[in-house]
Amino acid sequence: MDWFDDETFWRELYPYMFPPERFAVAGEQADQLIALTKCTAGAALDLCCGPGRHAIALAQRGFAVTGVDRTACLLDRARERAALQGAAIEWVLEDMRRFCRPEAFDLVCNLFTSFGYFDNRADDLQVLRNLHASLKDSGVLVMEMIGKERLARVWQSAICTEHPDGSMLIQRPKVVKDWCRIQNEWTIIRGGRAQTFCFEHAIYSGCELRDLLLASGFSEVQLFGSLLGAPYDLEANRLVAVARKTRR
């Protein structure tokens, strides 16, 4: 079983990946990506939507939203939260390599380093081709992830974080495959018991991500260092790509 297919992984790490403060900023981030893309209405796809943070925020801002994820327990959380907030959203359980809805969306977002899970980079290209096909003409894709340049600049071989419930998270990343991928070992210590989870994903530089987007059919790609539109330079905190589909 691949790590991303293991629902135990997502259930156990949920409090650490999705603490309350990440939900608290989802609305602000949705406003930022709307301003960045200048896409203010229409149909939106949140690919790898997880517990629905940004899908719900976009629905609250008037978009007709589809949230896609392959993990049932995360979609269950998304449905519960959307119901509590009165947000009408279509939730789809599907692998991002297979989901494609031709010319259906004005806006697509893939956020929080929810890309590059697969060993074969051809799968990443297939995902982007599906997204290109799923966008209407003049539609726009926003991707947000940790960039290879920043990762190299702020690298730490071990990170230890104590959480409000008294548990401790120890992260031990390792660069593998000639700086193409990163292996992560996360150990949770709570109640005198330790659990360790391992996962791996691709890491992209700005240039690599731009080239992949262009190869998948996008005609215009801009890179930024944040959803606020900061330049992708030495001060960049994140790698944000805005890719547009235009009729050829």
Image: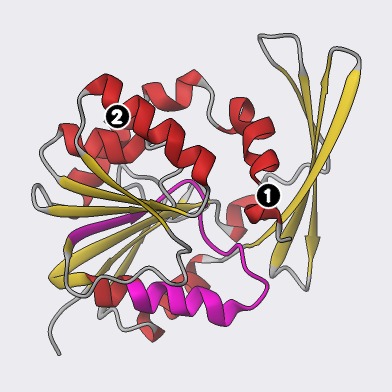
Span colored in magenta:
106-130
Q: Is residue 209 above or below residue 186?
A: below
Q: Measuring 37% from the left and 37% from the top, which residue is drawn there? A: 52
Residue 96 image point, x, y percent: 45, 64
Q: What's the amino acid at mark 1?
A: Asp
Residue 241 counted in the magenta span: no
Q: Could you tell which of marks 1 and 2 lies nearer the N-terminus?
A: 1
Q: Which residue is mark 2?
A: 82
Pointer 1 and pointer 2: residues touching (CB < 8 Å)? Answer: no
Marks 1 and 2 sit apart, C-alpha to C-alpha, by 24 Å
Quarter location, residue 12: top right
Q: Position of residue 35 (x, y in %)?
A: 18, 44
* Percent x, y of residue 118: 62, 68
For label 1, the crowd category at 10 Å Cα-Cα, with few meaning under 14, some 14 to 19 and many 20 or more, is few
At label 2, the amino acid type is Ala
Residue with the mark numbered 1: 6
Kind of element beneath mark 1? loop
Q: Secondary structure at mark 2?
A: helix
Residue extending farthest bottom = 248
Q: Residues within 10 Å of mark 2 (few under 14, many from 20)?
A: many
In this figure, which colouring scheme has been used for the structure?
secondary structure
| Residue 111 makes an appearance in the image | yes
How many tags in the picture? 2
Residue 118 painted magenta: yes
Q: Image quadrant for the N terminus? A: bottom right
